[in-house]
Structures are given as C-alpha cells and as structure tokens.
Amino acid sequence: MMPAADIIRHDIVLVGGGHAHVQVMTAFGMDRPAGARLTLVTDRLLTPYSGMLPGHIAGTYSHDETHIDLWRLARATGTRLIHAPATGIDLAEKRVAFADRPALSFDTLSIDIGITPDVSSIQGAAAHALLVKPISTFLEKFEAALRATPRPKRFAIVGGGAAGFELACALKARLAREGIADAQVALLSGAKLMPTLNMGVRLLARLALRRYGIDFLSGFRAAELTAQGVRAEDGRFHDADLVLVSTAARAPSWLAKTGLKLAPDGSLAIGPTLQVDGRDDVFAVGDCATREDDPREKAGVFAVRQGPILARNLRARATGGALESHKAQRDFLVLLNTGDGKAIAGRGRYFAGAGARLWRWKDSIDRRFMAMFAEFGREMARPATADEIASGGAMRCAGCAAKIGPDPLARALSRLPAAPAPRDKILLGLGDDAAATEVAPGVAQIETIDQISAMIADPYVFGEIAALHAINDVLAMGGDPTRALALATVPRAQPRAVESDLVALLAGARRTLDAQRIALVGGHSGEGEGLAFGLSVVGRAAPEALKPKTGLIAGDVLILTKPIGVGLIMAADMRGAVRASVAAAAIDTMRRSNADALSVLAPIAHAMTDVTGFGLAGHLMEMLRPGRLEVRLDLGAIPLLPGALDLAKAGYRSTLTAQNAVQGGMLRREENGALPDTVEESLLFDPQTSGGLLASVPEATAKQALASLQAAGYAQSAIIGRVYPRDTLDVAIFCRGNLG
C-alpha cells in the first residue's frame, strides 16, 4: 500500500508566470509540503523581468539574461507546467478554464497575470501603436519594427511614468549604439514627468532627457494615433514613424467574468493575506491585484516582495497552518536605468541621486534576483555518468526511452517455448511492431498495442503524444487505423485530482484520434506511480498494400520524415538542463502526426517502419535483416532537433541509448573503420517517442516525394542514405559525413 503522504491530496494551481509565482516555484522546489502538487498555467514559456527590460533594449543585457525560463524552472522545481492561456475560472466547480482543452481543477488558486495597457481612450491605438505590455509580445514586435524597411527614425513614447522614461533613454542608447545619429525620440505625457516620484528624481530625469536630446512634451494627452503620428486632445500633432504606448494599464478583462471581487481599476481586490476578498481558496498578487485597504502604485517591487509571503501562505493552505499578513513598505527604492552606464535613484519624498555607482548597484540587484532562478537545480542538471546509467543510479528515462533494450528483449523471447500455430492467416507479424491477419478475402486487419510512461507533466499533451506514438505502428505498415482501446494510468491522488488528470489525458488522446477518425471504443484505467498511457489500435488495409519492414531493394534511397534527438533532449530535460525553445521543438515534433506522410510514401515505398525505441540505427538494422543488403548513411543529412547536437556533445544520453548501441558493431565509417562510442553513435541509437517514418523508396520518386513531404509540413524530412547489394548475409550500415 502506498503511504498516504505520497498521495496527491492538495492541488495548488498558479495562473501566470509573474515575479511572485516564480518565487513560489523555487520555494516549493526546496521544500514541498507532503501531498501537495504545484501546477503552473502559463501562456508563455519565458517570462521577462521588467527591471532589466530597458537594459535589454539598450543592448546591455542579452535576451536570455532578461528572461526566466519557466520550462526549465518548472522541471528543476518539480512543478507541473501547463502551456496554455487560461480563459476563465469556475469558482463553483473550482476549475481553471481554457479555450481548447479540459478545465483544470484546483484546491487552491493563485493569480499573477500582470496587466495590459488601457488604450480604450486613444483612437487608432490598436492599429498603429506598439504596446509595451505584455512585455513578452512587445520585444518581438519591437525588434521587427526596427528591422522594417524603411527603418523608422522618428519615435514617440506615450506615457511619462518611470517605464516610459526608461524606455525613452534605452531606445536612444540603442539607436546611438547602432550609429543612427539622426533618429528622433520624444516622450509624450499627459501630466508631469513621473508624478509619483519626488522632485529631485524628476529634475535628474529631465536633465538626462536633455543630455540625450529626447524631447519631452508635458500635458500631451494622446487622443488619436495615425500612421503619421500622435494627436493630442488639445489638437497638437506630433510626427512619428513608430509609436510605443506605456500608459496606464488594466488587468485582463476576463477576470471580470469570474465572479471574483474587483477593485475600481478592474484588478482583483485582495486583503492582507493576499487572498481575494470573500475567498479563502483564491490568492492574487502583482499588478493584477490591489489591496483596497492599503493601495499601492503598480510597481514590480511589490510583486517581488509578495513572493515569499505568498509561498508561505500557499504552504499553510495545503497543510492547515496559519496565514501571514503582507505589509507593503510605504517608501521603496526606485532605480532608473538611463542607458548610459548610469542610474537615477530615489526614495520617499527627499532622497535622489544619479551616477555610475547607482547603476552598478541596480545591476547587481537585478542579476542576483535572476540568478536565483537561472541557477536553481544546476547540480541536478549535470549529465548522468555511464556508471550511473549502467548501475540504475541515474534517473530513468520515460516515453519510448523507458522500453526494454533489444538484447534483454531478444533473450527473454528466446527463452519462451514456441507458440502454437495461429488460427488466422498471418500476413505480417514476426519482427514487426504490429500484426496483420487476413480477415476476409482482400482485407487485412492490422493490430498493435503500445504504452509509454509520461516524459512531460501535462497530461493533455502527453495524451496526444502517446496516442500518436501507438498509431504509428499501424501507419508504418501502410494501414488505416479505425478503432482503439485505451489503457490509462494516473498518479495516486484524491478522487477529484484523479478525475481531472484522467479527463485531460483522455481528451488529449481523443484530439489525436478524432482528427484521424479513429473511434475510442473502450479501455481500462488505474492509479500508479506516475502518468502512463497506451492504446490497442486496430486498422485495415488491402493485403497487397501492406508495407513490411524488410522489403528494401538495392538502389532505393531512404527518407526520414522527422528529426531525431527526442530521447536525449527528454533525458536532459528530466535533469532541468533544457531551455524552453529546445523542449518546445521536441514536443512539437512528437505532436506531429505521420498520417499525412503516409499518404505521400504509401504509394511508392518498398519498405517502411517508424523510428522509436531502438533509435534510427536500430530500426534500420531491423529493416536490413535478413537480406544481402547494406545501407550507407550520410550523417550530415540526418535531420536533428534544435539543441540535440549540443546536448549530445555535453554528454547527455537517454538511459536506453547504451543498450541500443550494443549493436553498434554493425556500424562502420567508410573512411576510418569502426564508429566509436561518440556523439554520432549516441544520436543514431537515441530512442524516439512518436518518431518519424523511415521509408525505402525508388530513387526516381524520391525528390518529388521529399518535396511533397515538406509541402505537407514535414519541414525537416530528408533523404538520408542509399541501399546497396552485399555479398554476405551480415547486416552492415556504413556512415559518412559528419553530424553537425
């Protein structure tokens, strides 16, 4: 019996990857309450740190230095991550709603989703403005605008607060660094410059604007934006090629539909414990929340200071402890980046200063804050050693990489007695991943079964991937899948959490099955140590249309429809060592169905298989047996997932790679003998989950087939080798070229 402490008893859901929530993640990563599961719901995998945004625009910081990688941090802290925008909250059912996937249940909810500029009073803003918030979308659009032809040279920033001031200085510094001396930057404000700060800070800021040659127009309340510039309420017009808006902002409008209490500005009304007024199970922090009893201006410093209190109160909610009250400081330090290696500081009513030392102080504060997240879990992120993998001491991989290696599997099967003669006519089966039987004249039935453990924490996306993985065996045999039975395992939890996980898992699988008109006709479910899913799939084909693994013909070329590298990327990801962009690319390729590829390859392929647990080389060896054939691969032509080569060079390996590579003696380099245990071998034997199709096709049809595959969305599909005759029955794969 599983200890009660290991059962999921309390689901804490964080909506939004703001500054307070990332601190909750690290706090729970260091000390998670027994029975509590932490889930982050976010519409982006990288969250920018607003304090370093001006420095990034000015060129002081790189993109990576100014963004917290939520994917990597979630892995390192053991937080489940749901990459999808929340669209609503059902308070009665205690669920977070999404647009295109099942709702997520919670026991405790926390909201940290920031704000967006309120441009409702500015006509034409939607068409002609570049909104500074949300920052994640602003940066990409900003860089694209600077590269536009003709390049803008007249810039206007609407909003005279601290954010607008820093943005104006940073933009001028950026333009000067790029040698655009004749660019004009203007700061337009409906009131005084930074009216909430003291007179000394405002004076120093005006001097900085003058030093930079930035025009400041006070009392310029923007009323209309056009393609030519900005018109004020009093009729004045300011010419501009690009207008950036950094004015007053509001919380996202969907919060108004939740039934949660709102403050007059549309943000969530919260009390001293950071709970939304009237609810003990919903918290809110950052700019999307307002303390009605102790209001403060919208500033990132408050969200940062709320983080530790929020973490302790969420822990108390899960364990039945007492909650703490948060008291925001009355005065706080303001450090403004002027983009020239200096900063302006201010606090309270009187303190103000400027200089390079203040910039170095600000820089050290910002870098220390970001280091808390970038460095979290670095020790865990090192590659596992060969001894750790061999002894079982390394974290075991999931997905198809958790399958039994070829040698133990072959030995186990050889120890079993011979099976009785089948009663049905077997058309294909031995040596294949699916079996084809003749069920009627001219009709072959294809059957397969496959189950994998979860390599990602999101049950919905995992359900999609696992279903595609199981269907691939029928597709690789040239069949049309028609129905399936499911076998689902979800983590042990209280009934409400079990239901939520099971709904998401099956809905993800149904998305895959419904898209291919495959009926889910039943199945079984149970609880276990973790998430796992599989399908028994039945399909049909004409007997003459079946595609065996071993039908290669000398002179054929080999086409691979998807890049490889999933296994080692997921292995590195388990250790918190993979960037969000690398993980996202691997997940995207696993979520890509092979059905469209089959429609291209089925009419021409002599042989076909899907590349899964044994890796590219392992499955190619299966295709070569037992004929007098050999294959010569062009290593340089084999498509790789982004980041796979770098991770392989860093020493990351799936725990199945070593078992797959015992067959490496069949690999040879044409120019210098045996292929050693190197990066190349680790990639060739890397296990794939929901991998691509590998097809042997006539050379005359290959280029057209490749063009059709790429037009159908398989952008990295490639011709990777050729089939040659061989004098002996030995299996051989020759390699040339160089990966990477």
Image: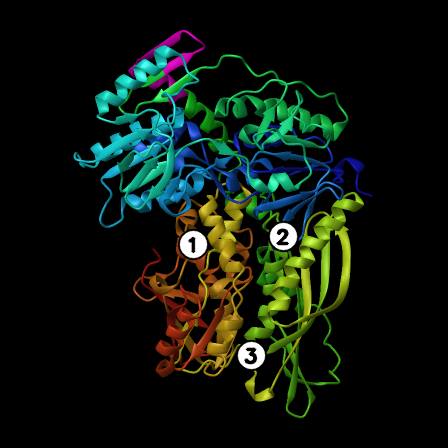
Amino acid type, mark 1: Asp
Does 595 sit above or below residue 156?
A: below
Amino acid type, mark 2: Ala
For the image shown, how many numbered marks are present on the structure?
3
Amino acid type, mark 3: Gly
Residue 449 lies in quadrant: bottom right
Which span of residues is magenta-colored?
345-364
Q: Which mark is residue 677?
A: 1
Q: Residues within 10 Å of mark 3 (few under 14, many from 20)?
A: many
- Picture coordinates of residue 574 (x, y %)? 55, 44
Residue pictured at 47% horizontal, 25% vertical: 369
- Picture coordinates of residue 443 (x, y %)? 65, 88
Q: Is residue 76 visible?
A: yes
Residue on which the image places disc 2: 454
Q: Earlier in the sequence, mark 2 or mark 1?
A: 2
Q: Nearer the viewer, residue 171 or 178?
A: 171
Q: Earlier in the sequence, mark 3 or mark 2?
A: 2
